[in-house]
Image: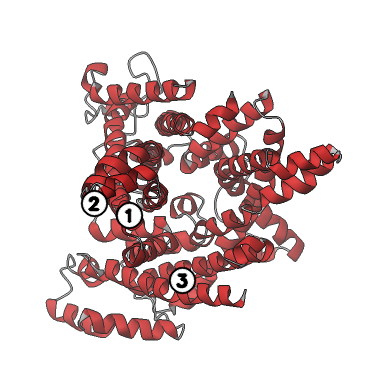
Amino acid sequence: MNKMIITGAAAAIFLILAALSAPLLTSYDYKAQDLNIRLAPPDAKHIFGTDELGRDVFSRMLYGARVSMTVGIIAVLISAVIGILFGAVAGFFGGFIDNIIMRFVDIMLTIPTLFLILMLIVFLGPSIVNVMIIIGLTSWTDIARLIRAEVMSVKKLAYVDAARLIGLKRRTIILKHIMPNILGPVFVYMTFGISGAILTESGLSFLGLGVQPPYPSWGNILTAGKDYIHTAWWMVFYPGLAIFLAVFSYNILGEGLRDYFNPRLKRENK
Amino acid sequence: MKQYILKRLLLIIPVLIGITVITFAIVHLTPGGFVRSNMEMNVKVSPDSMERLKVLYGLDRPLYEQYFKWLWRFVRFDFGESFIDNRPVLDKVLERLPATLLLNIVSLTVIFFLGIIIGVTSALKRNSFYDRFMTLFTFIGYSVPAFWLALILMMVFAVKWPILPVSGITSFNFDMMSAGEQALDVMWHLILPVFITAFGGLAYISRYVKSSMIESLTQQYTIAAYAKGLPENRIIYKNALKNSLLPVITLLGLSLPGLIGGSFIFETIFAWPGMGRLAYESAMTFDYPVIMGTVTMAAFLTLLGNLIADISYALVDPRIRYR
């Protein structure tokens, strides 16, 4: 274990805990408006200030953390399932099937991802569920290519030949003998995937294509804040800082995991 | 070499067809749609006139017929007309392309220039304070949401100290300027967007160059060069650097989708008149021909860029050519 894994994991766990225990950490309802204190600067009662409807920004951010964490994790799970499936099948069988899958990956890589996400969001309608699914559906190509390459190299190793020789089923070979060996890189990709999904979701919500008001997300708090950058800096500063810290901690975790699973790098650093 | 290029060219065709199928499918198979979303809620539009609209735009025909009609026009570089203002799609895309290309070419130049310098120097001073600082700095850039950074910089440079423009690509009195002033004005508007894009993209290149440089420095030929007693500077800058920069060409190819597609989130904030915003605007109004035109053209140009990157890589690296 290295420092980066510990720091990143601690920060990520902290964020998840904060999101889970949102009702315990704040006494304000994230929807409760108080028009007497519209756009009030941070003070002891509202530590991150209030927004244009007098709602507590800190509470909205805590509930917004739920959105970000859920979207990040679910979107990555979707993309990992698709990516592992396509990658493993392509790498294991090779030949025609591999060719078809990889051409499809090529196509996905050629269409700018943000355009693809934009089209799907607009046509399917903006909602948090759609955002998760769409991010998942558009971000599996990296994992697929990684898995394919790994499976192809693992496939040639002696123990896989041995497994085949003693007559094990293909499915057993893939699941029991090949997959465990490539889990490391998968974890690395998934961790980076979470931060990427959080970033995309906040960007979409910022444009009104993600989580819809009155439900809070870090992105849509920023949208409202954008109109008040002259007067209410806290509506822009804090939610963005939260996005940054979440993305940053998952990235550090991913970076640490990458080092951890890469034995060659470990040797170099010693 | 000829064979390699020919093979790559042939491989493009199925991918290109796939792109058109996917784009067409997304646009046409999803619920909602142009006529419905723009007319259905409007009580002034009768069902009868909605039908007539569908006929006018050819939306009443079977899907495969619409697809092949569109494909046939597409092959002849006819992308149809916008549903919204009836202008040719090609014109709309071509007028947006320069802004996106300008922003991204300038940003990419900055990113590659600084990224290579940071990567090489970090590789040479591995694990030093400088190396750690640069890693952290580029990593922060990689993690910071561009639209937030844009808003923060707007607060600082437009609200607090209004010294930099934060919106659009030209000033309002652009037409009255001389050519020199116009160039300066555009550069002036580029500063913040380029800074933000470059800050975000630096980590990728510098890390790549760094690890590739470290690898070259530990290769046999480098050790051999040292053993031969060549001056260190020559080993580093001639042998190692040259070899570690080869893969950067591929990176350039991989950066192309962003280069042409642009980012609609970013372009919306800066009111940057680029391709990303065109895609955003046309998607929001269900302007089918424009969306399909924008997406397929961006994909097509990306494909072309990747091809050029691959061919130039094969040209400089003989190992690829003879495979």
Residue B246: image location, x then y, percent: 66, 54
Disc 1 target residue: A92
The subunit letter for the residue under badge 1 reads A
* Disc 3 element: helix
Q: Quadrant of the N terminus of chain B?
A: bottom right
Task: From this view, report whether residue B56 is shown above or below residue B311.
Answer: below
Q: At label 3, which amino acid type do we have?
A: Met
The subunit letter for the residue under badge 3 reads B
Q: At label 1, which amino acid type do we have?
A: Phe
Q: CA distance from mark 3 to mark 1?
A: 34 Å
Residue B40: image location, x then y, percent: 17, 68
Find residue B310 and report its image quarter: bottom right
Residue A209: image location, x then y, percent: 31, 50
Disc 3 target residue: B297
Contact between marks 1 and 2 (CB within 8 A): the answer is: yes
- Please tell me which of labels 1 and 2 falls first in the chain: 1
**Residue appearing at x 45%, y 67% in the figure:** B299
Q: CA distance from mark 3 to mark 2?
A: 42 Å
Task: From this view, report whether residue B40 is shown above or below residue A87.
Answer: below
* Disc 1 element: helix
Residue B117: image location, x then y, percent: 71, 42
Task: From this view, report whether residue A109 is shown above or below residue B204.
Answer: below
Mark yes or no: residue A104 visible.
Answer: yes
The subunit letter for the residue under badge 2 reads A
Disc 2 target residue: A170
**Residue appearing at x 24%, y 48% in the figure:** A127
